Image: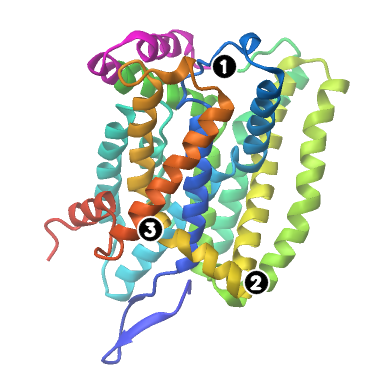
């Protein structure tokens, strides 16, 4: 089981909440807000670098490269992992009460789709709509044996479409993998981000923006990767891997993940020097990046677990992120609203005035402001505003 179980009057009631999971959510959402800020929330418009001092161009590049190395593809992966973990907790809680949670979770995914559309009004690259669509894999697989789940997760993480395309290129070097045409869609979103009103931005973001975002996710392997991470998170919950008793196993996982990360990233960097076929390089990068990001994510999760469970000072510091992690959805959506207001034309329009370095500090300010709000909010409420509404609507009509 994933954690200790609350027993009352001799009857199993539910799992206790795993605080370290909220710490990990906090780390993930913190990384996401920093990345989104330096990207100007998917609005790649920045001050002219030729007009900036040399030192500022240096810090811009240093911050960009460092943040993407630390969090690019990893913060999102932790967030997806914990989505699967949370599903297991909810599903198992209901099983212990003799209920089947699957139909209710389908309704919960429909609600998530609506929340994602609200988020999409402000931010074209939001992930909640994709989660609501891919999340059905949890309903379809949650009664499978653990070995089957691990096999399915491995297939997803190995990017079957990319593997197919790579094999096809080896057979026919002229082969081009099919891609969804998105240039016009992205051009439409960029135009309203640059010059549109709020209403114009909202309309384009909800249609062209969402289509472009989902197409990007498909073309870049995020659909398979997300499904694989959902399943892995569910398995972690089933096996209890976020408990202190599994620290030794996380140590072994980290010792395997570190050399694998170095080897896979090194291979990804080296291949263009030896293979000239751009299509093969593109598809191999998709596969290798999926795998080495998984390895790096394993290192991050292992480090957080070791610090949280083994070092009292580190635990005290990391515990400050628990309210932030428990309100992860509220924080994620509010980041989109704040960020689009800061950078897009409908708001302050600061995209052409704030470079990467300045935007990084804006991201830190947003994170610290949200953290302070969350710590205050959670003193009086058990759930964040959006989390509470999502929970209440999930169980609407239940007896």
Q: Is residue 21 above or below residue 290?
A: below
Residue annotated with mark 2: 247
Give the residue drawn at x 40%, y 70%. Answer: 17
Name the one closer to the observer, 324 or 252: 324
Query: Where's residue 253, x and y in %?
Result: 71, 61
Indicate the quadrant containing the C terminus: top left, top right, bottom left or bottom right.
bottom left
Quick one: label 1, few (<14), some, or many (20+) residues within 10 Å? few
Task: Tell me the chief SS of the magenta region.
Answer: helix
From where the camera sits, is residue 331 visible?
Answer: yes
Residue annotated with mark 3: 326
Query: Where's residue 252, x and y in %?
Result: 74, 65
| The quadrant where residue 278 appears | top right
Which secondary structure lies at badge 3? helix
Name the one closer to the observer, 240 or 269: 269
Whichever of labels 2 and 1 marks the residue nearer the N terminus, that label is 1
Query: Where's residue 127, x and y in %?
Result: 42, 36
Residue annotated with mark 1: 178
The magenta-colored residue range is 178-203
Horizontal side of 273 relative to 132 (left or right) equals right
Which secondary structure lies at badge 1? loop
For marks 2 and 1, give the CA distance: 43 Å
For marks 1 and 3, give the CA distance: 40 Å
From where the camera sits, is residue 237 visible?
Answer: no
Quick one: label 3, few (<14), some, or many (20+) residues within 10 Å? many
Whichever of labels 1 and 3 marks the residue nearer the N terminus, that label is 1
């Amino acid at each position: 089981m994933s954690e200790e179980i609350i027993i009352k009057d001799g009857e199993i009631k539910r799992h206790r909440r795993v605080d370290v999971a909220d710490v990990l959510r906090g780390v993930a959402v913190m990384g996401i807000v920093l990345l989104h800020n330096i990207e100007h929330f998917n609005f790649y418009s920045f001050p002219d670098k030729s007009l900036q001092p040399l030192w500022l161009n240096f810090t811009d590049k240093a911050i960009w490269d460092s943040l993407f190395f630390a969090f690019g593809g990893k913060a999102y992966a932790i967030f997806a992992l914990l989505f699967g973990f949370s599903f297991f907790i909810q599903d198992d809680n209901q099983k212990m009460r003799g209920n089947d949670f699957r139909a209710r979770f389908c309704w919960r995914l429909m609600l998530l789709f609506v929340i994602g559309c609200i988020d999409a009004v402000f931010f074209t690259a939001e992930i909640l709509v994709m989660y609501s669509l891919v999340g059905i894999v949890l309903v379809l697989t949650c009664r499978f044996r653990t070995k089957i789940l691990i096999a399915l997760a491995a297939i997803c993480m190995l990017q079957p479409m990319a593997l197919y395309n790579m094999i096809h290129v080896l057979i026919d070097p002229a082969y081009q993998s099919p891609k969804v045409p998105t240039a016009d869609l992205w051009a439409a979103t960029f135009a309203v981000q640059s010059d549109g009103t709020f209403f114009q931005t909202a309309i384009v973001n909800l249609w062209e923006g969402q289509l472009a975002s989902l197409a990007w996710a498909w073309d870049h392997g995020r659909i398979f990767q997300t499904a694989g991470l959902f399943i892995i998170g569910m398995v972690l919950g089933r096996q209890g891997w976020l408990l202190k008793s599994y620290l030794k196993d996380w140590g072994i996982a980290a010792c395997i993940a570190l050399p694998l990360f170095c080897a896979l990233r090194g291979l990804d960097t080296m291949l263009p020097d030896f293979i000239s076929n751009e299509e093969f390089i593109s598809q191999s990068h998709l596969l290798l990046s999926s795998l080495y990001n998984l390895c790096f994510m394993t290192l991050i999760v292992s480090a957080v677990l070791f610090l949280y469970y083994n070092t009292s000072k580190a635990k005290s510091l990391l515990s400050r992120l628990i309210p932030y992690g428990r309100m992860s959805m509220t924080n994620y959506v509010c980041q989109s609203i704040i960020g689009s207001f800061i950078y897009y034309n409908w708001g302050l329009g600061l995209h052409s005035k704030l470079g990467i370095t300045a935007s990084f500090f804006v991201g830190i300010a947003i994170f610290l402001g949200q953290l302070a709000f969350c710590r205050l909010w959670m003193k009086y409420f058990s759930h964040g505003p959006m989390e509470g509404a999502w929970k209440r609507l999930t169980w609407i009509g239940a007896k």
